Image: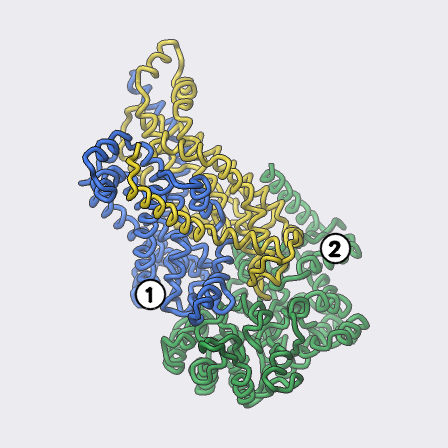
Chain colours: A green, B blue, C yellow
Amino acid sequence: MNRFLKKFSCAALAAASSLAIAGSALAVDLQFYFPVAVGGKAAQTIEALTADYVKANPGVKIDAVYSGSYQDTVTKALTAAKGGKPPQLSVILSVDMFTLIDEDVIVPFDDLVTSDEDKAWMKSFYPAFMENSQTGGKTYGIPFQRSTPVLYWNKDAFKKAGLDPNTPPANWEEMVEMGKKLTVKDSSGNVTQWGVRIPSSGFPYWLFQGLTTQNDVVLANSDGNQTNFDDPKVVEALTYMVDLSKKHGVMAPGIIEWGSTPKAFFEGQTAMMWTTTGNLTNVRNNAPFEFGVAMLPANKRRGAPTGGGNFYIFKDSTDEQKKASVDFVKWITAPAQAARWTIATGYVAPRPDAWDTPAMQEYVKDFPPALVARDQLEHAVAELSTFQNQRVTRIFNDALEAAITGKKEPEAALKEAQKKADAVLKSYR
Amino acid sequence: MKSQMNWVHAWLLLTPALLLLFAFTHYPAVVTFVDSFFSTPRGQRPAKFVGLDNYEQLLNDDVFWQVLWNNFLYAIGTVPPSIALAIVMALWVNSKIVGRPLVRMAYFAPTVLPLIAVANIWLFFYTPGFGLIDQIRGLFGLPHQNLIGETDTVLWAMMAVAVWKEAGFFMIFYLAALQAIPPDLREAADIEGTDAWTYFRRITFPLLMPTTLFVMVNATINAFRLIDHIFVMTNGGPDNASSLLLFYIYETAFKYWDTAYGATLTVVLLVLLSVLAIGQFFFFDRKVHYR
Amino acid sequence: MRASAAGLSFDRVLNGAAAWILAILWMLPLLYAIWTAFHPAAYEARFDLFAPVTLENFGKAWNAAPFARYFLNTFMQVTSILVAQFILCTLAAFAFARYEFPAKNLLFALVLLQLLVMPDILIVENYKTMRALGLVDTILAIGLPYMASGFGIFLLRQTFMTIPRELDEAARIEGAGPLTVLWKVYVPLAKPVYLAYGLVSVSHHWNNFLWPLIITNSVETRPVTVGLSVFAAIDSGIEWSVINAATLMTSGPLLIAFLLFQRQFVQSFMRAGIK
């Protein structure tokens, strides 16, 4: 029964789109995949926004499909594209841009926007976010679901340790010094509260990129075909991260789980944690103590990666569909909608004027930590992204995990990773 | 004439099942083999014949060797324990213990729960600090430990989950087999004053042999197939310490989109499974008459 | 039946205690799921007897993802697989059990090969096949590779072979065709096998994850397992209370069914001679 319905609706969709090609004024159908990477109201908000758009634009129908995690979404979009049924647009990790180009499934926005107004629109986003959207002089992604890591700290724990509860660590040394004061042991010598927690499971490269940026080194070029994993400054950053547990004893040893990090913070297992701004709402609702949010500490400079997803437009759709897609993206990233999105989820609104809207002004007044991420953007850089991105970041993650678990020395691990990455990327140079 | 009619009938009866079997088992197995000699098509570039290049890559891929070794350990660490536990469980549940239905349900419940969801619970158990295991260790003043965050322990932690998931399922097979053993054997043994261990070793265990063969084949296949918890708990990390062959195939084919290399890895898995199965049948053939 | 000497009863107590310890150990994940699902998130890692009880997590889970739809998808998938398996395997097993025909042994060996080369392993090629057939993201595609089951054919063949030929011949003398004989004589006698095999099949496909993950793209086809993984994989950390509520909600029916039927289940295994 369901299969029949599905087939039927597919046929209807195909018929509708062929009619649309014929130039009739019939509705344009768009399929739109979106991932949800934070709890709370993300999915409902996207669905509500989409519904509002459809209400205001009767000529367009949008089928918004909640496609799971980022990982699921790119897999789904690629499998669908390879099967000849791609969505018309999708939010996918900004770092998957090269993969999508390599698989030849997306089109640059430059080919679709012609008016001066539209061109100005493409320039209205934070440059830190656009770094992951552009390559070879073209813009492939429009930032939407973007985040950046920040430092959360437990003010009560700071007070108990005799630290000023309103002053987070400003640099690497301070983080170690404060971390030592914040690390609490019980009578049998077991640590009951760690100083800091930088999760390293799954995708350790992301938070680690905070450290490399602060150490003033870039991990990959903007063409996405050359990595810089064995740079001495990268080695230095990794050594610092490893030493947090090995030498200074302020962070738990071994791989630290990303998923249980907020809980560990709530449970008082750690006094500071690094995690995404996407957690703001979660921490605000669940932390049983007063907490603060700060930019990541600096070393040679301040710095953090950006993260999260961009809008991409898929190649295999009609001109009408592409036009309608651009129009939808323009609408949903406009200040009013971007503000609504940020308030609901904690993601960073991708353009400055969204922060000037009345709703946003009020939100920030009520909850000033939301501003930290925005202010950090001026120091932020592109998230690590290359051709064969999944494979290259996996190589890098393996090296980081090997160093963190003490299997390899940082330098040796990174040298090996660079060699492997070179082997993968050489055909793209 | 009659026999000809007969075999036309037989073929008609077989056709639907065989068609599907060929389409989704034999055909893909053969194509996997063929694909392993071609390159991965990407975007504009079609697949081309590359001879043994993929196999050469395989030999030089240290992740592959590690994953293979992990899988070997995983098989050793899950197959015998789940069989042993299944037998013990079946013996207990078959004896007259208090609250037998409840105990039986407890053993069997993991079979029904989806591993993909329960893996989150195990993640909590293993979490250092506030996780259940560390909370219990804390009562005895033992230090925290990061079971899934260290390369030495992570695979063992994954094995424990797999054994937990499987043992109760295999128990059912043993339970059925135990209940089919004639009770007069037990009575005869009691008269002769045979102790329980000797009885088990000399009577029960040999009679359970066909079940053991069946369960062992299944458990071995599961050791290569049961990877749901890896997705949730470790993603194969840290540094591939908990990655298994099928997980690596999934990553290669559906994350890196390198389908040709994925096919090559699948060939290895198929060969491995065949060798194991043939070995097991040969080993047990002398001890069991399985018809 | 058993000598009730003091030593033996001590043995029994010891065994009983060990059995119970293992049972509790085995139940821990389920107990933890129940604990977190009925208590606020703050008690996920605190086991306080006086923690407030709440049903809020179930509401949250229910609203956070279309579980009703996932549930329906799983139900349709499991049912379609089961029905197809029963029909296809019965027909094939009957042929193998009661007919002589060319290449019989070779074909049977090819069937048995599936015990080893399971569709779970051939994900790469089967995905390509589904794409060629235009079946990606359909419930049919989730089930298709499993519908002809080598295990099912083997099991039913073994059972059919134990059925005395006299019954068969008696029916034929009365003028029944082969399909009638199969339906009237063989199938009823193999009932326990169908029950046992059916339960194994249902619990396996209810919990299957990897293949549905790959082959489904949308809410309309996604089974519960994939839905749960999608739901749990969020960057902002694991909410055990909500995930476990979802887990209980989605596996509850199966759990209760097995609870109610476990006696029959074991007995059918015994009668089925799966041993």
Q: Nearer the viewer, residue A289 or A94?
A: A289
Tally of numbered tags: 2
Q: Is residue B222 visible from the viewing direction of this image?
A: yes
Q: Secondary structure at mark 1?
A: helix
Examine the image and state in which quarter residue B206 appears. Answer: top left
Q: Nearer the viewer, residue A96 or A134?
A: A96
Please give the chain letter of the residue carrying mark 2.
A
Mark 2: few, some, or many residues within 10 Å (few <14, many ≥20)? some
- Left or right, residue A123 beside residue C91: right
Q: Residue at x 32, y 38 (%)?
A: C112
Residue B163, image x and y in percent?
38, 52
Q: Is residue A234 visible from the viewing direction of this image?
A: no
Examine the image and state in which quarter residue A296 appears. Answer: bottom right
Q: CA distance from mark 1 to mark 2?
A: 49 Å
Kind of residue sitting beneath label 1? Gln
Q: Which mark is drawn over residue B66?
A: 1
Q: Secondary structure at mark 2?
A: helix
Q: Residue at x 71, y 69 (%)?
A: A342
Examine the image and state in which quarter residue C40 appears. Answer: bottom right
Q: Is B208 placed above or below A163 here? A: above
Q: On the image, numbered disc 2 is attached to which residue?
A: A51
- Left or right, residue C68 beside residue C98: right
Q: Nearer the viewer, residue C230 or A131?
A: C230
Residue that extends furthest to the right in the rendered view of this protein: A358
Mark 1: few, some, or many residues within 10 Å (few <14, many ≥20)? some
Kind of residue sitting beneath label 2? Ala
Screen quadrant of the C terminus of chain A: bottom left
Please give the chain letter of the residue carrying mark 1.
B
Residue C102, image x and y in percent?
27, 28
